[in-house]
Amino acid sequence: MPRLLIIALLVLPISAWALEPETQVAKDEGMRLYGLGIAAESIPLLEPAAEAGDVEAMYYLGEVHRLRHMGLTTEAMAWYLRAAAEGDVYAMLRLFQGGACTAGDRCPEGFEDWHHAALAIAQPQAEAGDPDAMLAMYRIQRMFEASRRAGEWLERAAEAGQPEAQTLLGRQILNGRGWYLTNGRRLGAAEEWLRQAAEQGYVPAMNELASVLANLERYEDAWYWYVQASDNGHINGRQWLGNCYMEPERDFICQVDQDLVKGWAIYYAIDQEVDGTSSRRSLQLRRELISDAERREAEELAGAEWIGREPPLSNFPPRFGY
């Protein structure tokens, strides 16, 4: 049976790779498009970095090909295998999910299957206190269908300060994890974890925290975190800004006075940068609220202040999502 030799040492890979400037620029643009769900166009932008040895680019090329075809295609497997050969745990888990060993006859050297290889890399580091490895252990134990152990590792990662783990734990609490006497207490427990992640600068947590605070009727705090999410590039946070500046009376979250020009500028900028979003429909629905002269002013404002703003807009898809 052909087997793939894991050439990397048993350590989680370092995602940063010294790339040539033009290759780094292309990779950054590829990752921007990936964050917006524009998968196909990211492929030629990520390939030079992957060919230069960037493990992160290898992994995301695997993700792009897998998501485009809803399964482990030949192209996806090839990139996952290259990332796995460099020690990427999540590439190994994708190979396990897709049956690369059982169906594709591409197995890791010295291991029964890819999730065993991932375990051999992540567990020693997790037990030594590495928060990222703890989060990886959560994913790995789920592959072993060991839900209790997976939950324990998620809690350990969150307690160690890993922001993605804190966000996942907050979401799980919202979705029913644990027992709480009232819904308010459940929301409060989720808030604690989401706030820890948000205060570390983890943008998905900012967006989630704003929603939780709104449900707790703490509207000023909710607005603050939607603004933070927007300032850090989250599409949903940016849409909240546009909505509130155009029609602040429609939601208690909106802690601003009406500014039709600014609101239209924000929605127009989103529509220009992110094809196929709900922003185009939002513009159509609100077109009669604003005069032609105000629209022209807004579109000029969008070009000056909102289009191409850094950091770029993103949906912030998780590294190991669907």
Image: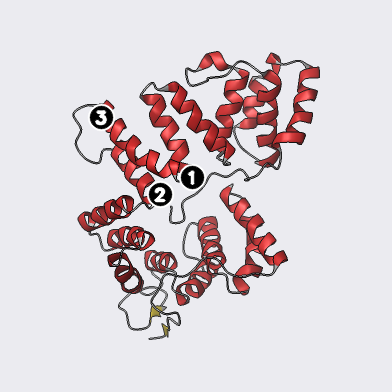
| Few, some or many residues within 10 Å of mark 1 (<14, 14–19, 20+) | some
Whichever of callouts 3 and 2 sits on the residue coming sooner in the sequence is 2
Q: Which mark is residue 280?
A: none
The residue located at (57%, 19%) in the rendering is 256
Residue 257 is situated, as x and y percent measured from the top left of the image, at 60, 15
Instruction: Report the disc number at residue 185.
Output: 3
The amino acid beneath tag 1 is: Gly
Answer whether labels 1 and 2 touch (C-beta < 8 Å).
yes
Residue 247: image location, x then y, percent: 59, 17
Q: Residues within 10 Å of mark 2 (few under 14, many from 20)?
A: many
Residue behind mark 1: 201
Of residues 51 and 310, the one drawn nearer to the viewer in this rendering:
310
Residue flagged by tag 2: what amino acid is it? Pro
Q: Which residue is mark 2?
A: 163
User: Is the residue marked by circle 3 packed among few (<14), some (14-19), or many (20+) residues within 10 Å?
Assistant: few
Quarter of the picture holding the N terminus: bottom left
Tell me the kind of residue under disc 3: Arg
Secondary structure beneath label 3: helix
From the top left corner, tell me how far across and down residue 149 is, in percent.
22, 58
Q: Residue shown at 70%/28% (left/top)?
A: 265
The answer to which image quadrant residue 146 occupies is bottom left
Judged from the image, the secondary structure of the residue bearing numbered disc 2 is helix
